[in-house]
Image (spheres, rainbow, N blue to C red):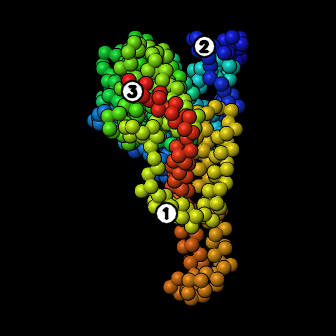
Amino acid sequence: MATIVTEEEEMMHNGEALPILSASAKNMNLEKLLATPLPTYDSSVPGSYLWTKVAFWMCRRVSSVQFRTTTTSKATPLTVDGAGAMCCGWHTNGLMDPLAIFLNHPKEFVVGARHDLVTRPLLGWWTRRLAVQPVVRKAELLRGGCTEEEALHLNGRSLLALSSGIAHGFGCVLFPEGTSHSESHMIRFKTGPFRTVLAAAALAKAKGLPLPHLIPIGLHFRRRELFRTDQFIEFGEPVELSDEMIPSEMVEAVRQGGWTEPPEASVHRIRDQLQECLPTMTPNSSSWEEHRALHLMAHAQARGNGKRLKSWQEEVLAARAIRDTWPGREDVLPPQPLKGERFERASEAAELLESHGLDGRALGPQGRVLRKANWRRLPSALLSVLFFLALLPFALTSLGFQVALGRLLGDSTDEGLDARTSYQFLAAFFGSLLIWPVVAGFWTTLTWFYREWIACTFGWDVSWLELGGYSPVSGLLVVYFLCFPVFWMSGKSFAAAWDAWVDTRNAWVRMRFSAEEKARLGRLLEELAS
């Protein structure tokens, strides 16, 4: 019998509101979930080698278009003597959060994910090839998605599979918050990642393998919901595990292939260690307005010192330094609002810029409220636009449907703003697989029908498709396969043209800033500096 809860219990669990479930998350097919392939540990990847490599190659291509800049920061080497790694970060950007870690960590990963990611059409086919293990969250259990026994059985199976992968030296990503959210700070930690890494340590101990470690990871997106935003992945100092955390009874249980709960004291010890360092690697603000104010102060302070924050990574670290040294600030979770007249001035100035779609990057050098347009970038911007226009027919046919689908799904999803870019990413990923071969066929067919016009236009022989005297089929095959790099270049040209448009729009907004608002902003910045 499914678990039944009252309305009050449905809204709250351990003092926190349960996440809103999407229609897909509410639809549970336990038989299909239990049929999910288990990872293998005798290969360099836990799933299908071919499909894993293809998937990650494509993910890197899509990510390079979706993000304008990507930077990483590594506190220590990310691979240690073949030991497995449990990566933990805060979770506010859906699929983009684990992908950011996968694509910037040198290890191959065993993957645990929300249960519906392995049963959805298209996506489910791919995740099963990657041996993704389904996990039932507390929200699905409390809202009656399955019985407690079913959830325990499925989660135990998945966590044991993930633990085995970590013990054999693979990486793993689990988010201690248990759900993607839209808060400006971390929410209550769940115990799943810590129980999993302790089970992995027990397995490693039983097999005489190196003990795994836990890596705190800061995931920073300038505006997570926007196309061509900036991302910064920050790898922190690892939390080491020790032999005394793992009792001999647990080692014996996992050696025999069973799942046993690790000691509560060890789970809490690792959780507390992560809670000491991970929130600092997030915005950790009481609100997004406070977060914007801190970043504005970072830019204003740099400008006051005659410098400029040139990258998103520099901006994140500078804002963190101001936040962590703010007078009277207490290091608690959730964080308390910052106070003081100086912060109020910064908040007012940040919201004034936000109302025009600007941020601290709009500030000018000392003595100037807003920076002027950088005309030296005009030639490269024009070249980007001209290159995009030259490839426009290919961009429209190969990318038009994907862009429209990604925008439609991202704007209409019932999973919140944190899922917007996930749908855009999936539209680009699967669109390339399903749409590009069809569009390439269209362009190849068009080439055949207009082969004489093409020959006249370029001064070629009318038999130009007969490469080396062979059948025209060989030439058409070359045309077909050449379409794919052309489609890719059209996507890159679209991204570059989009950057030029955004930069031009921001420069125009700065130029058209009203004298009244500019005076108000200048006054706020002067008061902030004093």
In the picture, the disc for residue 13 is 2
Q: Which residue is mark 1?
A: 383
Q: Which mark is residue 527?
A: none
Q: Which mark is in front, 2 or 3?
A: 3
Quarter holding the N terminus is top right
Q: Residue at x 56, y 44 (%)?
A: 512
Residue 388 placement (x, y as % from top left): 55, 62
**Distance of mark 3 from mark 1, alpha carbons?**
40 Å
- Report crowding for label 3: few under 14, some 14 to 19, many 20 or more residues within 10 A (C-alpha): some
Q: Which marked residue is nearer to the observer: mark 2 or mark 1?
A: 1
Residue 185 in view here: no
Q: Earlier in the sequence, mark 2 or mark 1?
A: 2
Looking at the image, residue 236 sits to the left or right of residue 225; the answer is left
Callout 2–callout 1 Cβ contact below 8 Å: no
Q: Identify residue type, mark 2.
A: His
Answer few, some or many: residues within 10 Å of disc 2's Cα (few below 14, many 20 plus, some between 14 and 19): few
**Residue ID for mark 3:** 529
The three-letter code of the residue at mark 3 reads Ala
Residue sitting at 67 percent across and 39 percent down?
A: 411
Q: What residue is at 63 percent from the left and 13 percent from the top?
A: 12
The image shows residue 138 at horizontal and vertical percentages of: 59, 20
Residues 210 and 208: in front is 210
Query: Reading the chain from its start, which is encountered first: label 2 or label 3?
Result: 2
* Residue 373 spot, x, y in % from top left: 47, 49
Position of 414 relative to 202 (above/below) = below
Q: CA distance from mark 2 to mark 1?
A: 55 Å
Mark 2 and mark 3 residues within 8 Å of each other at the beta carbon: no
Please tell me how crowded label 1 is: few (under 14), some (14-19), or many (20+) other residues with Cα within 10 Å.
Answer: some
Q: Is residue 399 left or right of residue 302?
A: right
Q: Of discs 3 and 1, which sits in the foreground?
A: 3
SS type, badge 3: helix
